[in-house]
Amino acid sequence: MPNDTDYLRFIDQTLLSDNWGKLTRYRFDYRRSDGSWQEQVREAYDRGNGVTCLLHNPETDCVLLTRQFRLPVLLNGRDPFLIETPAGLLEGANPEERMRSELVEETGYEVSALEHLFDVHMSPGSVTEYLSFYRGTYQPKDKVSDGGGEESEGEDIEVLHIPLQEALAMIRTGDISDGKTILLLQELALRQLTGQSG
């Protein structure tokens, strides 16, 4: 049970599922802004924290993205073949080290330098996970394998090289609808607009 605070008193918790991640229902008293206490019930899904990265080729102005099947997107009635930045769960690893291995595994590119940008809670109403965001550059010489992900983990990843302006247009058309990817593409566009490197 998490520790009580001056604004939260935990009553009980119930583990609902412990498969890939943990789904837990919490019952607690929350002290509202007027000082009164209100009992609430919330569920939280914990699958660990993750990392994602956008690689950009400054010579071609292309970004390195992936496309893969996402069951939850299908269940929501949308096109399940999502275009995304490479990403992975930390599983106790250092974020930058994990990102380097995910880049090789998913895209086949091994890069020397990554820059940490920020950490973001993507769905704080129900998921405990935060993502560490990175950026880097890549060139054809950095390719060390075909990528495509781990077949044993059910991954079947297509590697895409998309001009940045085309990728930004794909946000407006809905062809890119993944939150982490949109954040990183817009961060890069803003960096270019303000004359920063990259």
Image (cartoon, grey):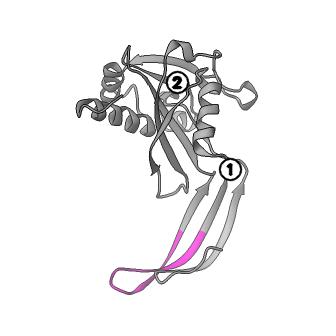
Q: Nearer the viewer, mark 2 or mark 1?
A: 1
- Residue 44 in the image, given as x and y percentages of width and height: 57, 60
Q: Which residues are magenta?
A: 26-41
Examine the structure image and report whether residue 47 is included in the region drawn in magenta: no
Question: For numbered disc 1, what is the local secondary structure?
Answer: loop
* Residue at position x 35%, y 32% in the image: 188
The quadrant in which residue 58 appears is top left
Predominant secondary structure in magenta? strand
Vertical placement of residue 150 versus 132, above or below: above
Q: Nearer the viewer, residue 188 or 84?
A: 188
Examine the structure image and report whether residue 38 is included in the region drawn in magenta: yes
Q: Looking at the image, can residue 121 be seen? A: no
- Residue 138 in the image, given as x and y percentages of width and height: 49, 21
Report the residue marked by disc 1: 92
Residue kind at label 1, given as amino acid type: Gly
Report the residue marked by disc 2: 66
Give me the disc on residue 13: none
* Residue at position x 63%, y 20% in the image: 147
Quarter the C terminus occupies: top left
Question: For numbered disc 2, what is the local secondary structure?
Answer: strand
Q: Looking at the image, can residue 56 be seen? A: yes
* Horizontal side of residue 118 vs 19, given as left or right: left
Residue kind at label 2, given as amino acid type: Thr
Q: Nearer the viewer, residue 106 or 95?
A: 95
